[in-house]
Amino acid sequence: MTTITDILETMDYGPAPEARDIADAWLARHADGFGHFINGRFTDPADLFAVTEPATGANLARVSQGSAADVDAAVKAARKAQPKWEALGGHGRAKYLYALARHVQQHARLLAVIESLDNGKPIRESRDIDVPLVVRHLYHHAGWAELMEDEFPKTRAVGVCGQVIPWNFPLLMLAWKIAPALAAGNTVVLKPAEYTPLTALALAQIAAEVGLPDGVLNIVTGDGRTGAAIVGHDGIDKVAFTGSTEVGREIRRLTAGSGKRLTLELGGKSPFIVCADADLDAAVEGVVDAIWFNQGQVCCAGARILVAEAVAERFEALLKARMKTLRVGDPLDKCTDIGAIVHPVQLERIRGLMAQGKAEGAVLHQGTAPEGCFYPPTLATGVAPASTLSTEEIFGPVATLTPFRTPADAVALANNTRYGLAASIWSENVNLCLDLAAQVKAGVVWINCTNVFDAGAGFGGYRESGFGREGGREGMMAYLAHGTPRAKKPAPDLPAPDPLPQASTAAGPEIDRTAKLYMGGKQARADSGYSYAVAGAKGPVGLAGLGNRKDIRNAVEAAASAGAWGRATGHNRAQVLYYLAENLAAREAEFTERLRSFGAGRDAAREEVATAIRRCFWYAAHADKMDGAVHQTKGNHVTLAMHEPLGVIGIACPSAHPLLGLLSLALPALSMGNRVVAVPSQTHPLAATDLYQVLDTSDMPAGVFNIVTGPRDELARVLAQHDDVQGIWYFGSEAGCVEVERDSAGNLKHTWVEIDGARDWAGAPGQKKAFLHRATQIKNIWVPYGE
Ligand code: NAI
C-alpha cells in the first residue's frame, strides 16, 4: 500500500511548459529569413546562416551574414541620423526611450520565450531576470536622457557607436549597450552574437513600432567578421564590446591609435569567498546563483569558491546535496533550474576543459543532465591554484572548491588571477566583509549576495576583465565627450638621441655632469652607460642618462613595490604633494633659469614654474576629495562606488613645457594613489631631473615617483608592454600612439594617448578633474541594507 510518506518521497515536479506558440508564430512570419535593420527598415535577407535551438538542435530561423557593405550602409545611416538625434535634446530622446521600455514590457512574453529558445536559458530567468532588467535599463536611461542638461552639462555625444555583444545575455547586453548610447545622443550600429541574434531583431521591430527615427539604431547580424568590420570602420567614433578577453585584445589592437573611444567588458574567473562565520545555507544558495545561473555562462560567475578550512567539509556536503536538487533540462519548463548550453561548440569546449582538469588531478562531483546540449552542475575539488580549472574561464556550470586558512590567504587566492571582474564575500562580520572588499581586485564586489545587477550601478572589471563601466552615471560617462573635438596636429617623430658615453665631456666644456635617472627614491646611473646631449637655446646645456629597457624594468619594479601609497589616506598623500609644492616654490628661481636655458623667455619660464606650483596645490587639494557615490540600487542593497587607483602608470611626457608637461600628468596620477614611472620630455629632460632633489626633500616614499630619461618612443613601448604597469599615458607621434595602444593589449592597460603638441599644457586644458578620472577605476561594492 502506498503511504503518504512514500508519496512525499517519490513526488516529482510535473512538466510545466511555457507555451511557445507566440514565438513560433513570429518565427513563421520570418520563414524566408531575416535581413539587417538599417536606416529604420529591414534589408532583404541575404547570405543566410541557420540559428538553432540548443535544447533540441532544431533550426529556429535563418539570419543574414553582414558584409562590409552592410556595415558601411549601417554606419552611414547612423552618421546621417546622429546630429538630428542629438539635437532633439534630452527630453526628446527620453520620450523614445520611455516608449521603447513600455513596448518591451508589452512584448515581454514574446521576448522571454524567444530568448529561451535561442539561448537555452530557463524561462524563469529570461522571464524574471533578463527581460525585467532590460526594461529597468531602458527606463533608467530614459531618465538620464531627461536630465542630460542638468546632470551632464557641457558634454556632447561621442557620435556613432559600434557595439558588439555576446550570446550569454543577448537582449540584456543589447539594452546595456544601446540605452546609455542613445540617451547621450549617439547613434548605434550593433551586432548581436551569431548564436543568438533573434531578440535583437525582435527589438529592432519594436524600435520601428515606436517610431525611433531612421538610422538611430541599426542592427547588423553576422559572425566575428561582421564584428571586425564594425570595429574597424572609419565612421565609428566609439567601440563598446562585451565578450571574450581574446577578442577584446584583438579589438584593442585593431583600434590602436585610431582615436576611437573603447570600452571592453571581458572575461572573468571570479572568487566566491565563504568565511568561517558565514551563513552557510545562504552561501549555498549564493553558489546556485553564482555559478549555476544561466548555465554558468556568466562573465562574473563565482567560478572559484574559496571556503574557510574550518567549515569547508560541511560546506562541501551542503553544496553537493543542493546540487542534486537542481533540475537540468527543457528551458521552456518553468521548473527548470539549468537549461541548455548555448551551442554544441561551447559544450565541447566545456568538456575539453573538464577533461584537462581531470587529467591534472581534479575530482569532479556532478549532478545529472539529460542527453543533448546540456551539462550537469559540477563541483571540482582537488584543484591546484595554477591548474586549468582554476585559471581558465570555463563558461559552464562548473565551480572549483578550494579551502583557505586565513582571510589573508583568501585574498591572495582571490587575486591570483589575471582577471578582476567580480567577487562575492560571505561573512556575518561586517568588518571582515569590508576589509576583504577593499583588498580584492575586482570591479564589482557583492557582500552576502551575488550576481545582482541594476541599471543604477556601474558594472565592469579590473585588469584583463577590461575597462569602462556600464550602468548608472559611470556608464553614461563612457558615451559622452567634453568640449569640442580637437583636430589632430601631426607631431614630428623625435629622432632617437645620440648616445654618448656617460661622464663624457664631448658635448662641450660647460657640461660638468650627467643627470642620472631616479628610481626607488634614489638616483641611478643609466644601465646603458650612455648619456645624451641636451640642446639648449644657445648650444648644449647638459647631459641626461640614456635610459633603456632595463632601467624601465627597474623603475617599474620599484613602483610595483610601493603599493602602500595607494592605501595611504588621501590626507596623507595631500600632505606630501603640498610639501612638494613648497619645495618647488623654494627653488622657483633655479627652475626658471633651467627653463630659460631651453629657450623660454623670462616671463614664460616664470609662468611655467608658477603654474607648476599651483598645480601641485590643486592636485594635493583633490587627493582627499575624489568622493565615490552611494548608488540607489535594488531595494535591500546600497552600492558603494569607490574610486581606486589603477596601480602603476607609465607616462611618456609631452616635449614642450618640460616641467609642466611632466607635473600636469604625474600629479593627478599620484594624487589618486598611483605610482608613476615617467619618461620626461626627451628634448628637455633636465627640468625633470632637477626635481630629484625636490622629491628627496618632500617625503615622497621611495618608488612612488620614478623618472627615466631617454628615447621617448622606445621607453614608452617598454612601459606599454610591461605586465606590472596598469595604465599608460603617451604624448607623442601618431605612430607612437598606435604602437603604445597596440602594445597595451597584453594586460589590457588603461590608455590615454594624444598627439604631442595638441594640448596647451600651460593653459586650462592642462589641468582638469577629468585627469583624476583617468587615474582611477571604480569598484562597486554591494552591501545589504535595510533588509
Ligand atoms: P567571442 O568573444 O568570440 O564573441 C563575442 C562577440 O564578438 C560575438 O558577437 C562575436 O561575433 C564577436 N566577435 C568575434 N570575433 C570578433 C572580432 N575579431 N571582432 C569583432 N567582433 C568579434 O566569444 P565566443 O567565441 O562566443 O565565446 C568563447 C568564449 O569567450 C566563451 O567560452 C567564454 O569563455 C568567453 N565569453 C565571455 C563572455 C563575457 O561576457 N565575458 C561572453 C561570451 C563569451
Image (spheres, grey):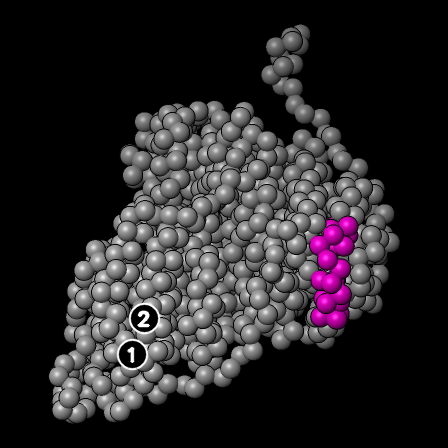
Instruction: Check the image and report above or below for 258 versus 50.
Output: below
Residue at (18% x, 60% y) in the render: 697
Which of the 4 quarters of the picture holds residue 599? bottom left
Instruction: Check the image and report above or below for 652 versus 182.
Output: below
> Is 640 on the left-hand or right-hand side of 538?
right
Disc assigned to residue 595: 1
Tell me residue 466's x, y (percent): 48, 57
Asked whether 91 falls inside the magenta stretch, the response is yes
Residue at (56% x, 78% y) in the render: 487
Q: Looking at the picture, tell me which residue is in the foreground, 484 or 629.
A: 484
Residue at (63% x, 14% y) in the render: 8
* Crowdedness near tag 1: few (<14), some (14–19) or many (≥20) residues, C-alpha within 10 Å: many
Which of the 4 quarters of the picture holds residue 217? bottom right
Instruction: Check the image and report above or below for 21 versus 721.
Output: above
Specify the amino acid type for callout 2: Val
Q: Looking at the picture, tell me which residue is in the foreground, 472 or 188.
A: 472
Instruction: Identify the residue position indicated by label 2 in the image.
Output: 609
Q: Is residue 401 visible?
A: no
Please tell me which of labels 1 and 2 falls first in the chain. 1
Residue at (17% x, 68% y) in the render: 523
Quadrant of image for the C terminus:
top right
* Crowdedness near tag 2: few (<14), some (14–19) or many (≥20) residues, C-alpha within 10 Å: many
* Count of marks overlaid on the render: 2
Q: Pointers 1 and 2 in contact (CB under 8 A)?
A: yes
> Is 728 on the left-hand or right-hand side of 482?
left
Tell me residue 103's x, y (percent): 80, 46
Mark 1: which secondary structure?
helix
Mark 2: which secondary structure?
helix
Specify the amino acid type for callout 1: Leu
